Image (cartoon, grey):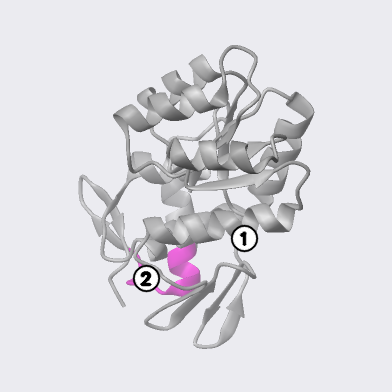
Amino acid sequence: MLILLVEDDRSIAHALQRALHTQGYSVNTVGNGKTALLAIETERPDLVILDLGLPDMDGLDVLRKVRARDVELPILLLTARAELDDKVAGLDSGADDYLAKPFEMTELQARLRVMERRLTTARTAEISIGRVTLDINHHSVARDGDAIELSRREFMLLKSLMENAGRVQTRNTLENRLYSWGEEVASNALEVHIHHLRKKLGADFIKTVRGVGYRVDSP
C-alpha cells in the first residue's frame, strides 16, 4: 500500500515513515499543502495521512480540495487539534478518520489496517488462498501451515497481490507499493521478487498476465 504522509515536522515525518516502512507500507512524504495536492494529482496514493497544521495552508482546506476531486481516496487526519469541534469539522469536511497528537503508533497502525481493508477484497487480518495464508497483523506467511521467511518487500508484494485477489496488479502499481520516492529501483527488481516468491510458494501461485502485470486467483 502506498501512503502519502503530509507532515511539515521533519522529525515526526521521518519517525512515522520509518515506523510505517517496518509495517510493510511504502510511504512518500511532503511538507506542505500545495505539494500534497500536486502529489495526489500526479500519482494517486492508496491512502493519505494529513496533518492539519501545515505552513502554507490549513489542512482542512487541503482536505476539501482533495474531496472536490476525489471522494474515494481514504484520508486520516493527524493533528494536535484535539477539541471535539475540530474533530467534527474534519469529519464533516470528508476525512475518514481522525487521530489526535500525541498518539501511540500501535493505534495509528490499527486504524490504517481498518482503512486498508476497506480498499481490498480482503475483509480480515488473515488471508488464505489455496495453500498459502498471510497474517497482516503478525507479518507472517505460511504454506500448508509451515512458516515461510520473506523479506520485507517480498511480504509487501505478496500482501498487495493477496489483498486484491482476482484483480490484475500492474507492474507500475506494484512498484509504487514497494518503493518510496528517491529509492533506486533496478529494472528487473519486481521480477526478482516474483521469482523468489514463486520458489517459496509454488510456481503457479502468482500468475503472469502478459503485457499487464500479475495476479493471484481469488480464494
Secondary structure beneath dot 2 equals loop
Q: Position of residue 122 (x, y in %)?
A: 40, 68
Residue 200 magenta-highlighted: yes
Q: Amino acid at mark 2?
A: Ala
Choose mark 2 or mark 1, whichever is in front.
1
**Residue extent of the magenta highlight:** 197-206
Q: Nearer the viewer, residue 170 or 12?
A: 12
- Label whose residue precedes the other's in the sequence (2 or 1): 1
Q: Kindly identify the residue that appears in the image at 43 percent across and 66 percent down.
A: 198
Asked if residue 154 shows in the view, the reply is: no
Horizontal side of 155 relative to 215 (left or right) equals: right
Q: Is residue 97 above or below residue 133?
A: above
Q: Is residue 109 above or below residue 141?
A: above
Asked if residue 14 shows in the view, the reply is: yes
Q: Nearer the viewer, residue 169 or 17?
A: 17
Q: Kindly identify the residue that appears in the image at 43 percent across and 19 percent down.
A: 38
Horizontal side of 31 relative to 4 (left or right) equals: right
As drawn, the label of residue 203 is: 2
Judged from this view, the residue extending furthest toward the front is 85
Q: Kindly identify the residue that appears in the image at 74 percent across and 25 percent down.
A: 10
Q: Is residue 141 above or below residue 82?
A: below
Q: Position of residue 216 (x, y in %)?
A: 32, 66
Label 1: few (<14), some or many (≥20) within 10 Å?
few
Q: Kindly identify the residue that appears in the image at 55 percent across and 79 percent down.
A: 142
Horizontal side of 15 relative to 29 (left or right) equals: right
Horizontal side of 212 relative to 67 (left or right) equals: left
Quadrant housing residue 101: top right
- Disc 2 and disc 1: Cα gap in Å? 33 Å
Quadrant housing residue 70: top left
Q: Amino acid at mark 1?
A: Ala
> Which residue, given by chain and number where applicable, does mark 1 sit on?
110
Q: Nearer the viewer, residue 24 or 29?
A: 29
